[in-house]
Image: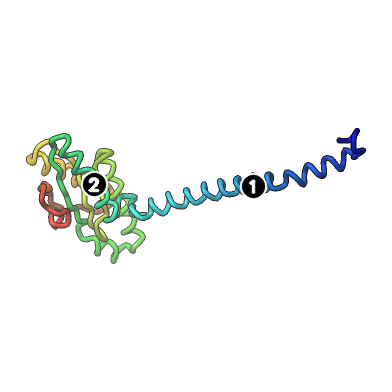
Amino acid sequence: LRVLHRVSPIEIYREAALQSLPVWILLLLLVLMFLLLRRLRSALNLVTHLMYQDPLTQSMNRRGLFERADRLRALAERNGSKLAVAIFDIDFFKQINDRYGHEAGDQVLRAIGGGLKAQLREYDVLCRWGGEEFVALFLVDSPEAAPGVAERLRASVSNREVGATLSGGVVIWRDAEALPTAIS
């Protein structure tokens, strides 16, 4: 072009830049969209995590429990296991809050939630059901094994240095039964 039309190199580069400007803008927009998508995905993961998990105890909340319960029930059926439902209540929790304050109560909740979670297997489920109540779903080979597992869970956190004990109960979740009924 320079030889035939006597166009200076600066004019050639300027015209090339102008002609390719839409491509560069499109590439910039694609990069920005990619960065925005990554940020949105990160925010969605955080919201999903908060939607299913209790932030204080790092155990599931009720929504998370109901979400995971069906999968755990399917696993029990596939393995020929039974699914046990245990509920634990921190004894005299109101007195802990009244005597030592809510921060101490939160520490007790964190310690007990963490202790129960540490005793369960990866696929078992722990849920903070209410203020000081926890529900655990776990697989057992036979219905007779459920009380022993529940007692081991209860004793493991009652022996901690948190100044609190647990009371609880355990049932086998029957096939036609709704989870809230089993918990009740």
* Residue at 55 percent of width and 50 percent of height: 36
User: Is 127 or 28 nearer to us in this picture?
Assistant: 28
> In the image, is 144 to the left or to the right of 33?
left
| Residue 74, x across and y down, in percent | 19, 41
Looking at the rendered structure, the kind of residue marked 2 is Val
Q: Secondary structure at mark 1?
A: helix
* Residue at 22 percent of width and 43 percent of height: 72
- Image quarter where the N terminus lies is top right
Estimate the spatial distance between the alpha carbons at disc 2 and disc 1, rounded to whole Å: 58 Å
- Image quarter where the C terminus lies is bottom left
Judged from this view, the residue extending furthest toward the front is: 4
| Residue 113, x across and y down, in percent | 29, 50
- Compared to 116, does 100 lie above or below? below
> In the image, is 10 to the left or to the right of 143?
right
User: Is 144 or 180 nearer to us in this picture?
Assistant: 180
The circle on residue 116 is: none
Which residue is under mark 1?
Answer: 26
* Residue at 15 percent of width and 52 percent of height: 168
Q: How many marks?
A: 2
Q: Residues within 10 Å of mark 2 (few under 14, many from 20)?
A: many
> In the image, is 22 to the left or to the right of 57?
right
- Dot placed on the residue nearer the N-terminal end, 2 or 1: 1
| Residue 13, x across and y down, in percent | 82, 40
Judged from this view, the residue extending furthest toward the right is: 6
Tell me the mark number nearer the camera, choosing from 2 and 1: 1
> In the image, is 83 to the left or to the right of 117?
left
| Residue 10, x across and y down, in percent | 87, 41
Which residue is under mark 2?
Answer: 157
Quarter of the image where one finds residue 133: bottom left
User: Is 101 or 25 nearer to us in this picture?
Assistant: 25
